[in-house]
Amino acid sequence: MVKTVFGWIRAHPIWSGLIALLAAYAAYSLLVPSKPEYAYVTETAGRGEVKRVVSASGKLRALNTINVGAEVSGQVVRVNVDFNSQVKAGQVLAVIDQTRVRARVQQGRASVALAQSSLQQAEANIARARNDLTIQQREYNRRKTLADKGFLSKTALDQAEAQLIGARNSLQVGLTQAASARAQISQANAELSSAQLDLNRTNIIAPSSGVIINKLVEPGSTVTAGFQTPNLFEIAADITQMQVEASVDEADIGQVREGQNVTFTVDSYPDERFTAKVRQVRQAPVETQNVVNYLVIIDVANQDGKLLPGMTANVEIVTGAKKNVMRAPSAALRFRPRQSDLPGDADAENDGDRKGDKQPTIFVATDDAYRPSLRKVKVGIRGDDYTEIVEGLKGGEEILLRTKSLKPRDEPGDMAEDDDTAS
C-alpha cells in the first residue's frame, strides 16, 4: 500500500505538491486561531461629577418688553428712531399729522369763548332783572299801603302785583340762562381738553428708557386707532437682564424646581456655555399636536450684550448633581457584548429580565479581552453622560462601552468604523 502511494506521488509530482499544500493549510487553520475582527472599547472606572439634566429649547426675551402704540388715527409724518436706537423716557419716537387735531382744538376754544359770552350776557340780564325786581317790589309796597288806606283802587294794586311777578320771572329766566351758559362752558372745556389730549397724543412718546428692538411704522404710514391700539414700536427696557422661555416636556417637568442651575448654548456662540437660574415654572399647559409642554422662565444675565432677543437657546436644567462619586458611562449600562463572548452568568441575568426582576448591569474587562465579567450594580443619579455607581464597581476597573471593528476599510487611509452593540 505504501509503495503504491509513493509510486503515485512519483508519477504525479504536481498533484502531489498541491495536495500537500492544501493539507498544510488545513492543519494551520485548525492549529492557529484566526485574528479577531473586532475589539472592545473600554473606559477606566473612576470618581467624578454626575449631573442629571433636563434638556429643552426656548427663546430669549427681554425681561421687560414694552409695546408702544398710537391712540389717535392719522398719517405718520415723522419717525425719529430706528432699530437698535437707544431711547430715554419721554423721548418723541414719531409724530402723527396734527392738522385735524389742531382744528378741533381751535374749534373747542371758540366754543368755550362763545359759551363764556353767553354767560356774560345771562349775568347782565340777571343784574337788570334784579334791579327791575327791586323797583317793582317798592312800587307794589307803596301801592298796597295806599290801597289799604283807601286812596288807591284795587285795579291799580293788581297791576303793580302783575309787574312784580313779571320781574321775578325775568330774574328766574336770567338765572336759568346763566346755568345753561355755565353748562355749555363745562362741555366746551371738556371737548377742548379732549382735543388738546389728542393733540399731545400725536407725539408718540417713549414710556421708559431702553432699546428699540422692533419698528413697525415708516413715514407716510397711516395708523387707525379703533377697537385695538396699533403697535408702532417695541422697546426692550433692559437687555442686560434677559429671560429664556423654555418648553419642557410633561415627562420631565416634575424634576424642575425654582432656583435650579441652568446652562444653555445659542447657535451664534456654539462653543460658549451660558449660565442661568430657573425663576418660575408656569402651571398652564401648552398643547401642540397632542404634545403637552410647560413653560419654564429662566433668568439670564447679559452684561456683555452678546445675547439678543429672539435667539434660540438649547437649555440643560440641572435637576441633580453629585461630586466625587464613583461613576460609569451611562452607555455602559445599556451595552451587551457579542453573544459568543457572554459569560455564563449572563444567562441568569436574561432569566431575571424575563421575570421582571431586572437589576442594572455592566461588563468589566478581564485578563481575556474576549471574556468580560458581568457585574450587577446599584446606581444613584442617572445622567446623560455618566451614572453614579453606589455598589458593584471599583476604581481602576475597565468598563466595556462598545465594540470596534478591526476590519480595514476598502479605501486606503480610512480608519475602521465602530460597531456599537447595546442591549
Image (spheres, grey):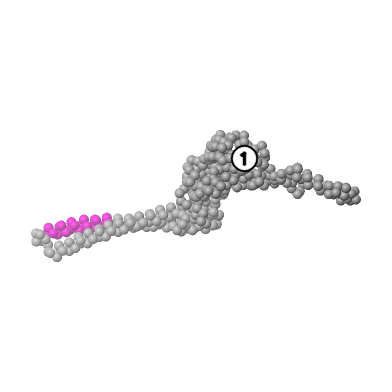
Q: Left or right? Give the position of 413 relative to 395.
A: right
Q: Magenta segment range?
A: 126-146
Crowd band around label 1 with a 10 angstrom C-alpha radius: few (<14), some (14–19), many (20+):
some
Q: Is residue 299 visible?
A: no
Residue located 76% across and 48% down the image: 411
Mark 1 residue type = Ser
Instruction: Give the quarter of the image for residue 123.
Output: bottom left
Image x and y of residue 73, in percent: 48, 57
Which SS class for mark 1?
Answer: strand
Q: Was residue 172 drawn as part of the magenta stretch in this picture? A: no
Q: Left or right? Give the position of 228 relative to 160.
A: right
Q: Looking at this rendering, what residue extends furthest in the front direction?
A: 1
Q: Looking at this rendering, what residue extends furthest in the bottom direction?
A: 155
Residue located 9% across and 59% down the image: 149
Q: Is residue 75 above or below residue 359?
A: below
Image x and y of residue 395, in percent: 60, 34
Task: Give 238 or 168, whichever is nearer the viewer.
Answer: 238
Q: Was residue 127 drawn as part of the magenta stretch in this picture? A: yes
Image x and y of residue 109, in percent: 41, 55
Image x and y of residue 145, in percent: 12, 58
Query: Label 1 belongs to which residue?
Result: 373
Task: Give 393 or 271, whichever is nearer the viewer.
Answer: 393
